[in-house]
Image (cartoon, rainbow, N blue to C red):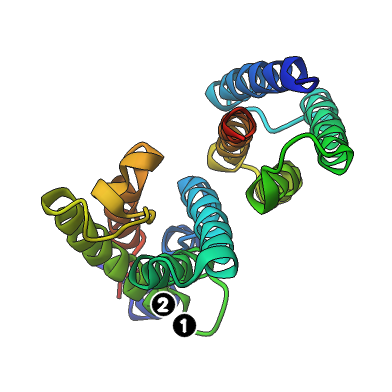
Amino acid sequence: MVIDPLQTVLIVASLVLALVTGVYVALDRSPDRVLVALLALLEAGLVVQAVVGIGQLIGGSGDPGITFVGYLLAVLVILPLGLLWSLGERSRGATAVLIVALLTVAFLVLRLEQIHAAA
Amino acid sequence: MPQPDAARTPAPGRSGRSSTSTGLGRVLVATYAVFALAATARSLVQLLTKASEAPLAYTLSALAAVVYVLATLGLAEVGPRPRTMAWAAVGFELVGVLTVGTLTVLDPELFPDATVWSAYGQGYGYLPLVLPFLGIAWLVHTRPRD
């Protein structure tokens, strides 16, 4: 399985970024360019995962099917939507929205790995 | 002694307090949105791929998805009467997770396939059980005061 190392990196990156965002919340700092850039980097990794994953499906290795593709695509919308909702207000709660988004991404990638392994 | 005029126009702080979508409410809305997405996706996959296998469980999944979507919109203050919608959705959610949770624990065979609320949301780290309590607490905390 080619995409496994990438998924491990994505999960670790999501969790580390969730911790970093936690520091922002603790210090009552709003997301700045550095944090947004790191989120964009993670999102790029998720796009790579989707492309590789769908490519493998077309290549015909197994048939994890609709659920697998669903997860690959669903995980792409989480960070943009979370960031949009987070930037709508300047408060600790708004910044903490990013933690929810990042934990969701970590969870979805983990499930993706499990679905892939089961197939 | 409060002035009569002051009683008619709510102070900025008070009107801010009665919003369900600001401050901590944003985190709650985000969490509900995740469940709305998860439940909707799960329900769509179940209905599209194997609707006949477990009609009851899949209908329940679809119902849960609608409830989470309405709760998200209500708490995010979308629509004409968001607070009423949020109360209705979160209340239904509480009844749903307690009923389905209890039934599935007593009789695991009742629903052949899992729903979000099976075994009190065990498959989702029991968050489906915790969420309605948080939702109700938040609606009470932010209730408009006359």
Element on which disc 2 rests: helix
Tell me which corner region of the image, top left, top right, bottom left or bottom right, holds residue B48.
Answer: bottom right
Element at badge 1?
loop
Q: What amino acid is labelled 1 in the image?
A: Arg
Residue at x 80%, y 20% (from the top left corner)? A2
Could you say which is closer to the camera, residue B95 or residue A110?
A: A110
Q: Which residue is mark 1?
A: B81
Relative to A4, residue B83 above or below: below
Residue at point 83% right, 28% down? A45
The image quadrant of residue B100 is bottom left
Residue B123, located in which quarter of the rendered image? top left
Residue B22 percent location from the top left of the image: 53, 54
Observer able to see residue A21? yes
Residue B45's place in the image compared with A71, above or below, is below
Q: Position of residue A43 (x, y in %)?
A: 80, 34
Is residue B56 left or right of A76 when viewed as pictured?
Answer: left
Q: Are marks 2 and 1 in contact (CB under 8 Å)?
A: yes
Q: Which subunit holds the residue at mark 2?
A: B
Q: Is residue B82 above or below residue A112?
A: below
The residue that disc 2 covers is B85
- Quadrant location, the C terminus of chain A: top right
Residue extending farthest to the bottom is B80
Q: Residue at x 58, y 64 (%)?
A: B49
Residue B36, placed above or below residue A35: below
Q: Amino acid at mark 2?
A: Met
Q: Could you say where residue A65 lies in the image, as x and y percent from the top left?
A: 69, 49
